[in-house]
DNA sequence: TACCTTATTGTTTTATTAACACTATGAAAG
DNA sequence: CTTTCATAGTGTTAATAAAACAATAAGGTA
């Protein structure tokens, strides 16, 4: 039941965020081919005929970064006929969130990408295609998810301190929160349980460690206090 | 720059809501061909090579209902390889909202649809493909939009009463709201201005008419009081 | 003139959010 | 062993927002 008309190509683009060096980073590639050769772009590629969109996104991301097991979520599908000068390409964008340890590995260059690099979202280069728009949209979604779901916990180790959690929010929202109100809010949401451990090897008062109770991504309105 | 491999087909599906007879309705078609012949389904069709996704959605919707000038918003893209038994079809779903007057016209049967009909969302038939899931998702989005944006106003005439507005919310959320709290909230949001008119031809105290100040879809957290 | 129907309005209570500063603990430095 | 340094940890009050709640007003109809 395929039409007899020319059909669009379908690609996935993956906007990958990570937190490194106390700053929110996004993974970009430098294009090795025309169009937009030598411009920075969001990594992506074509969907294969027998893989799902999510599988395609996972595969492309792993090819690019070697990272598996990430949080992955569909963002939006961009399909303007003119968005790609090569022809009709509809792209389904995904946003991925990986934690620092997982993203530590060396980034590889690939056929289409002469270079891959983490950029701070505050110091972005000019981007190819309509990728600036897509990235902006992804940022919005990321913040929304931090505000209304438990996604932030996916970036923390099994056991973490409340200060670690707060720092995450401060980086993503680029803003400080009041420590007392933040902790009060988190506790009132019943998301975490204290472990009996405390963190050692710190040269100050050792913080308590907590573990997360709920499912990642669950909707809870964490709304950062002091909004 | 098309790959030399078989490519998926790209379709759009449009979940169309309207409010009729004090109830939230969705437009479905009865399939005239296999697969799922004689099952009800969400109307949709293939994207043409030179039209945008949104244009395709508008076109399909107009073909189905004759309605133009509707609120239209992209929902999600479903792309499981097995979701359509005919082959690889990726469908970009849209949700549309039209008001009662616009949706009053006769629905036409088309090549693929032997019948088109408005169903109350409370009395849905069994649906073809993965359409039950898509519809459920659309309902969620509709409610979210009513809660956090000014979308509801797109269903009202230029001049409307506060009771009309409240009824809309009560239908969409399938719940009553306290009249005083509802009105207080709406007024505090500075969304409307009173006109100097009142509605005539009613056999009770005639209500004041208001007009809407802002842009449709603007984010404002109308959150229905009494949530 | 009474009655019916819907419109309109305000107060109190409760819950949530915002603002705000001091004490505690352990390691390291002197 | 005392002081210093750095971060952890905690509670109260004020302001704002939400929830609960019922009586009066206006016009048409009987």
Image: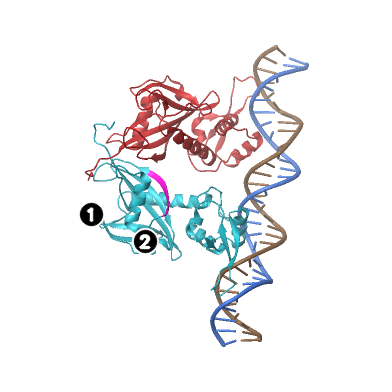
Chain colours: A cyan, B red, C blue, D brown
Residue A86 screen position, x and y as percent = 23, 45
Q: In the rendered structure, does residue A75 fall within the stretch colored magenta?
A: yes
Give above or below for A61 relative to A49: below
Viewer-side residue, D29 vs B199: D29
Image quarter hosting the C terminus of chain A: bottom right
Residue B6 screen position, x and y as percent = 25, 40
Residue at which label 1 appears: A33
Q: Is residue A102 visible?
A: yes
Q: Secondary structure at mark 2?
A: strand
Alpha-carbon distance for marks 2 and 1? 20 Å
Quarter residue A61 falls in? bottom left
* Sequence-first tag of 2 and 1: 1
Q: Secondary structure at mark 1?
A: loop
Mark 2 packing: few (<14 Cα in 10 Å), some, or many (20+)?
some
The magenta-colored residue range is: A69-76
Give above or below for B27 relative to A183: above
Direction from residue A15 to residue C27 in the image, left or right: right
Which residue appears at 49% of the width and 33% of the height?
A: B154
2 and 1 marks in contact (CB < 8 Å):
no
Quarter residue B12 falls in? top left
Residue A163 screen position, x and y as percent = 55, 64
Residue at which label 2 appears: A118
Q: Disc 2: which chain?
A: A
Which residue appears at 46% of the width and 65% of the height?
A: A22
């Amino acid at each position: 039941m395929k039409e007899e008309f020319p059909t669009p190509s379908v690609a996935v683009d993956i906007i990958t965020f990570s937190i490194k060096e106390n700053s929110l980073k996004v993974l970009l590639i430098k294009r090795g081919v025309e169009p937009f050769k030598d411009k920075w772009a969001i990594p992506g590629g074509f969907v294969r005929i027998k893989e799902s969109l999510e599988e395609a996104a996972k595969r492309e991301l792993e090819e690019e970064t070697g990272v598996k097991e990430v949080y992955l979520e569909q963002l939006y599908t961009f399909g303007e006929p003119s968005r790609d000068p090569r022809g009709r390409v509809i792209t389904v964008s995904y946003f991925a969130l990986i934690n620092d340890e997982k993203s530590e590995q060396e980034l590889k260059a690939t056929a289409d990408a002469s270079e891959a690099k983490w950029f701070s979202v505050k110091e972005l280069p000019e981007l190819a295609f309509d990728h600036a728009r897509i990235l902006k949209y992804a940022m919005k979604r990321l913040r929304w998810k931090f505000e209304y779901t438990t996604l932030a916990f996916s970036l923390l180790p099994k056991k973490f301190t409340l200060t670690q959690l707060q720092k995450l929010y401060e980086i993503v929202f680029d803003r400080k929160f009041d420590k007392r109100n933040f902790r009060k809010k988190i506790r009132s949401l019943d998301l975490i349980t204290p472990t009996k451990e405390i963190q050692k090897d710190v040269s100050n008062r050792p913080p308590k460690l907590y573990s997360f109770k709920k499912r990642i991504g669950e909707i809870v309105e964490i709304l950062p206090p002091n909004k």
